[in-house]
Image (spheres, grey):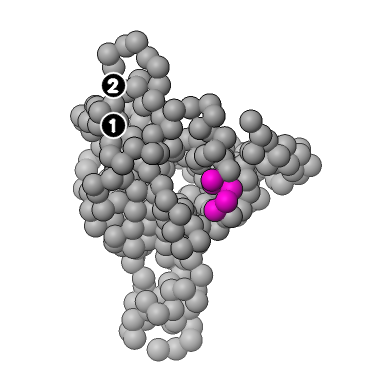
Amino acid sequence: MSHQTALAAPEDRRRCTGESHQSLHSLVSPAGEALAIPAARHPEQADLEAALFLATCKIGGVSRDPLGIVSVRPEPERLGIRMLAEPYVTRYWADMLLPRSVADDSSDPHNRIAGVPGLRYRSERGGICLYRPGTPARILLTGFNPRWWERVTDLLRDDYQLLQDQSDWTPDERATHTAASAFPVKPAPIFSPLLRRIRATAGPGEINATDAWSSRGGFRLEATDGPPCPDLVRLLGDGPTGLGWEADHKTCTCLCDHLRGGCNIDFRDPSTGYFVYYSNGKWGRTHDERHRSFMADANRDAFAR
């Protein structure tokens, strides 16, 4: 196998995951075939990954890294996530993910738990392992000082009744999770594989943000400064790293040097029949003085009560 072939084999996977060529070198076959991205083996793993994605994607644009994710390491049994080493990102993730009881007088189980129901964490090999008791689901967070996570959770305990010390799911967590599972459109088949390819949604600019939510019987996927549409269609479509998503309808200004405005693609996932309505706003933000000031303030406040 030539050196050029060895470099090309993991190229699309690297673009989707942010992994280094060195970390993927041992996975390249002697024939130099393109590297696929493994799916979550267990439904519980896919469910946890989708829940994490939907909970944290509201972070907005903090850097080149969508959701504050520098890279992911997808494996069948678990997912590794290397996060941006900024205290603000650690604070946001812990705040959005960790489950806590919510005082609510309604009978709707959706209103009883904030965060991801059943989620627990423990320190593990220099990172923070997220898991759900009684399931094989595992997500390992690395790239930041684990002591930041502990400092943040100590602060959150002062304000909330965190459920971290519960060895099993609480009845309210079970009820909330069961109610969400009854929705006719399931997020796991869409957002677990997308999280495993999260870097594919990042454009070449200095600030990237990716957001998603349920919409029109399917899902809405929004990038503020996403990649050129041909790249996204290839990476999420029928390529070796792809999801098999089909571009059902597209309005694209990527190749026009005289037109301004965003792009829109209606993707269809043939395996589920779900539509994913994607838009790229092309905000063109930069890491300017205003953004640097925001991050400095946010990082300072990350450990504040």
Mark 1 Cα-neighbour bin, 10 Å: few <14, some 14–19, many ≥20:
some
Q: Which residues are magenta?
A: 146-150
Identify residue type, mark 2.
Pro
Q: Is residue 245 visible?
A: no
Question: Foreground residue, 83 or 245?
Answer: 83
Q: Residue at x 44, y 59 (%)?
A: 124
Q: Quadrant of the C terminus?
A: top right
Above or below — where is 182 with respect to 285? above
Left/right placement of residue 21 relative to residue 116 reads right
Q: Quadrant of residue 297?
A: top right
Image position, residue 78 (x, y; %):
33, 58
Q: Is the magenta region chiefly helix, strand or loop?
A: helix
Q: Which mark is residue 170?
A: 1
Q: Residue at x 46, y 63 (%)?
A: 125
- Alpha carbon distance from label 1 to label 2: 12 Å
Image position, residue 186 (x, y; %):
26, 37
Q: Nearer the viewer, mark 1 or mark 2?
A: 1
Q: Is residue 206 visible?
A: yes
Q: Which residue is mark 2?
A: 109
Question: Foreground residue, 1 or 114?
Answer: 114
Judged from this view, the residue extending furthest toward the top is 105
Q: Quadrant of residue 100?
A: top left
Q: Which mark is residue 217?
A: none
Q: Secondary structure at mark 1?
A: loop
Question: Foreground residue, 188 or 266?
Answer: 188
Q: Secondary structure at mark 2?
A: helix
Above or below — where is 70 with respect to 149? below
Identify residue type, mark 1.
Thr
Q: Earlier in the sequence, mark 1 or mark 2?
A: 2
Q: Residue at x 48, y 83 (%)?
A: 4
